[in-house]
Image (cartoon, helix red, strand yellow):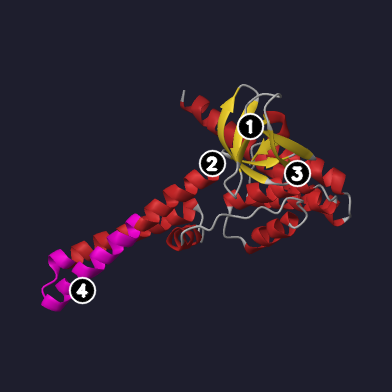
């Protein structure tokens, strides 16, 4: 029985290592195609990697670059946005996303965000969810060390210092945990989407007979707020809402 279990474990490890090698080889091949200007082939290989379940930000970033080279605005923006969800603090991703957005026809006026909310979001996006979680654990361990120092210290000044350090560490640990949760929610958020059709007319109701409200073009980002059958109600950055069909967008 033991030998059988060890055999199964060994087989699983071997399979995982083979898969990791094949993905690594595919990634190298895709990068090679991209460098040689074979963007269509690179796109096929990058998307093959993503279908295996490997959703690293680098893959989405490079896929976005390949689409950008082909001047495919909607797919470039879509994949940069997906890369940004996984690594929102990456300067290259943010820069290329902004560059791709200059190719989008629609110039939507963004409703100004309250400065404290804007600052907090920027602060939260400095690290990934996993990095915030790791920092939270480290700070919690430091809190325990400070507590031990407080309990066993014989000198008054050491008790005071360890007490206040413990308060500081536990506060920052909770903040880091909160940021980790926020970034996890941000990365798993499925309400954001990109217009994929060349142009789409937003309706006042989930019906082809609804009143025409406004037109959006490929590459524009929207937020999904409701759905009825094949129709989705979306909101854009300036606060306007309307209905369009599911086929016109792709979720980030």
User: Which mark identifies residue 189?
Assistant: 2
Please tell me which residue is depicted at 58% across the width and 54% down the height of the picture: 87
- For disc 4, the marked residue is 161
Residue 29 drawn at (x, y percent): 81, 48
Numbered disc 3: secondary structure:
strand
Q: Where is residue 210? Give x, y as percent.
A: 67, 27
- Determine whether label 4 and label 1 are within 8 Å by CB: no
Q: Describe the element under mark 1 as helix, strand or loop.
A: loop
What is the C-alpha distance between the residues marked 4 and 1? Answer: 62 Å
Is residue 59 visible in this depiction of the protein? no
Q: Earlier in the sequence, mark 4 or mark 3?
A: 4
Q: Magenta span has 134?
A: no
Q: Residue 23 has which mark?
A: none
Q: Nearer the viewer, mark 4 or mark 1?
A: 1
| Residue assigned mark 1 | 204
Which of the marked residues, 1 or 3, is nearer the chain's N terminus?
1
Q: Which residues are magenta?
A: 150-174
**Closer mark to the observer between disc 1 and disc 3:** 1
> Spatial distance from mark 4 to mark 2, Cα to Cα?
42 Å
In the rendered view, does 252 fall on the left or right side of 179?
A: right
Q: Is residue 182 left or right of residue 53?
A: left
């Amino acid at each position: 029985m033991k030998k059988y279990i060890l055999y199964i474990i060994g087989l699983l490890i071997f399979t995982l290592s083979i898969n990791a090698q094949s993905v690594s080889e595919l990634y190298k091949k895709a990068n090679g195609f991209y460098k040689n200007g074979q963007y269509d082939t690179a796109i096929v290989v990058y998307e093959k990697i993503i279908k295996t379940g490997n959703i690293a930000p680098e893959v989405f970033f490079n896929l976005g670059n390949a689409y950008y080279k082909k001047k495919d605005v909607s797919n470039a923006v879509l994949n940069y946005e997906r890369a940004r969800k996984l690594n929102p603090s990456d300067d290259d991703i943010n820069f290329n996303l902004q560059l791709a957005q200059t190719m989008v026809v629609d110039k939507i006026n963004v409703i100004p965000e309250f400065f404290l909310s804007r600052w907090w979001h920027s602060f939260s996006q400095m690290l990934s969810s996993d990095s915030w979680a790791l920092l939270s654990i480290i700070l919690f361990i430091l809190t325990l060390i400070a507590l031990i120092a407080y309990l066993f210290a014989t000198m008054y000044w050491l008790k005071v210092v360890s007490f206040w350090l413990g308060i500081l560490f536990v506060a920052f640990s909770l903040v880091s945990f909160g940021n980790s949760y926020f970034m996890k929610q941000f990365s798993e958020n499925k309400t954001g989407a990109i217009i994929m059709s060349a142009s789409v007319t937003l309706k006042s109701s989930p019906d082809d007979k609804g009143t025409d409200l406004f037109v959006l073009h490929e590459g524009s980002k929207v937020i999904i707020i409701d759905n009825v059958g094949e129709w989705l109600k979306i909101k854009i950055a300036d606060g306007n809402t309307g209905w369009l069909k599911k086929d016109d967008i792709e979720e980030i």
